[in-house]
Image (spheres, rainbow, N blue to C red):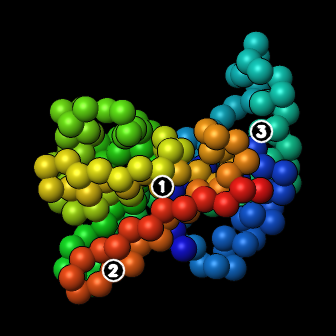
Amino acid sequence: FYVAGDLVFGGEDSLNVWRRLMELKAKLIRGTSDIALASLNVASLTGKDPARIALLEHTRKSLGEIIVKNIGRLPDEHRGPLVDGSEFLMVHGSPKDPMTEITVDMDDSEVIALLDDDPADIVLCGSSHVPFQRDVEGVRLIGLGSVGQAPEGRFAHYTVLTSTLSGTIVEQASVEY
């Protein structure tokens, strides 16, 4: 299991989500909400959305200080080999900047700038929360979608990559909850 960031903030049961990810030995990277959870100073957020601040404080309290620090220390990317000799890169946003997302509606030149000459053959992106697949200059881009914040509402997206000697098969689906 691989999770491209935005792991626990905003959910109803953050601690059990974290425990389940640890139980699965999931490969995790941090997303924008993970960085916020681990690093924002609540006192500096005066004038911001009080409900979001309360949710931030509640999530921190339910996880505890050690888990919050561990989330803040997660890497910004995960890279690995595939059976056919190609390589994948999982980022929250893009290879150039883990917090700048690649979206389905970007033109090729915008995407190429965010790929930043990274050598990966497949780039998995989580930040846009919209599942998509496209090829740009020999790089296969896969928007993974979102489990907890899908744009269409109460759907959990998931992507399954099957690596074979002849290439990688990508299946994308969602389940309603």
Local packing at callout 2 (Cα closer than 10 Å; few below 14, some 14-19, many 20+) is: some
- Cα distance between the residues tagged 3 and 1: 25 Å
Q: Which mark is residue 144?
A: 1
Q: Which residue extends farthest top?
A: 47
Q: Position of residue 140 (x, y in %)?
A: 26, 57
Q: In the rendered view, tell whether residue 155 sits above or below residue 24.
A: above
Q: Residue 165: x, y in percent?
A: 23, 86
**Disc 2 residue type (three-letter):** Ser
| Residue at figure coordinates x 41%, y 50% from the top left | 132
Quarter occupied by the N terminus: bottom right
Residue sitting nearer the eye, 48 or 166: 166
| Quadrant location of the C terminus in the rendered image | bottom right
Up-down: is 102 above or below 44? below
Q: Tell me, yes or no, if residue 113 can be seen here.
A: no
Q: Secondary structure at mark 3?
A: helix
Amino acid at dot 1: Leu
Q: Which residue in the structure is indicated by mark 3?
A: 56
Earlier in the chain: of badge 2 and badge 3, it is: 3
Position of residue 170 relative to residue 29, above or below, is below
Question: Residue 33: x and y, percent?
Answer: 62, 42
Mark 3 and mark 1 residues within 8 Å of each other at the beta carbon: no
Label 3 amino acid? Leu
Q: Residues within 10 Å of mark 3 (few under 14, many from 20)?
A: some
Q: Secondary structure at mark 1?
A: strand
Which element carries disc 2, helix, strand or loop?
strand
Where does label 2 land, which residue? Answer: 163
The image quadrant of residue 48 is top right
Q: Look at the numbered discs 2 and 3 and tell me whether their residues touch, using CB distance below 8 Å.
A: no
